[in-house]
Image (tube, rainbow, N blue to C red):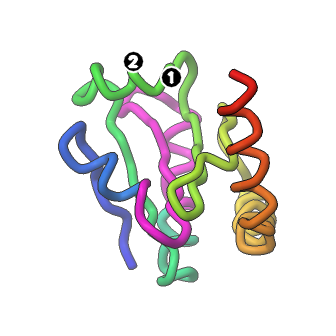
Amino acid sequence: MATVELTADTFESIVIGDGISLVDFWAAWCGPCRMFAPVFEKASEAHPDVTFGKVDTEAEQVLAASAHITSIPTLMAFRDGILVYREAGALPAPALEELIASVRALDMDEIRTRVAAQSVSA
């Protein structure tokens, strides 16, 4: 599966669904973003069951601001609609593969319990 360009109109529908979604916030002028792009694209081909989305922070400034993006590239991982990973910086291919494996291995019942506990205490 190739990467999908995400916009303010499509972002939420992609990340709130079931399964795993990885979102790369990037810009054309960003050197580390350009270095990470082929790594992200190759991973998208190796993991057709994962949605790989890209947000151009220049074209989608409101979306980037609402996601509190202050540094690019920033990678977010969602599983079953829950943000489970967020980190700035380009990952090498082995680290991205480890992240995907880690997200697959998450106990989502435990994650949902934690999220529910946090919303009660908030």
The answer to whether 22 is drawn above or below residue 62 in the figure is below
Toward the left, the furthest residue is: 9
* Number of the label disc, if any, that sits on residue 104: none
Q: Quadrant location of the C terminus? A: top right
The spot of residue 101 in percent (x, y) is 77, 72
Q: Residue at x 76, y 40 (%)?
A: 117
Residue 26's image quarter? Answer: top left
Residue 102's image quarter? Answer: bottom right
Q: Amino acid at mark 2?
A: Ala
Q: Quadrant location of the N terminus? A: bottom left
Q: Residue at x 58, y 45 (%)?
A: 76
The local crowd at label 1, few if under 14, some if 14 to 19, many if 20 or more residues have their Cα within 10 Å, is some
Q: Nearer the viewer, residue 79 or 69?
A: 79
The answer to whether 108 is drawn above or below residue 114 in the figure is below
| Residue at which label 2 appears | 65
Q: What's the CA distance linking mark 1 and mark 2?
A: 6 Å
Q: Does the magenta-highlighted stretch encompass residue 17?
A: yes
Q: Amino acid at mark 1?
A: Ile
29 sits left or right of 102 in the view? left
Specify start and end residues of the magenta stretch as a single range. 16-40
* Number of the label disc, if any, that sits on residue 69: 1
The spot of residue 54 in percent (x, y) is 38, 49
Say whether marks 1 and 2 touch (CB < 8 Å).
yes
Residue 79's image quarter? Answer: bottom right
The spot of residue 58 in percent (x, y) is 29, 24
The local crowd at label 2, few if under 14, some if 14 to 19, many if 20 or more residues have their Cα within 10 Å, is few
33 sits left or right of 90 in the view? left
Q: Residue at x 32, y 36 (%)?
A: 56
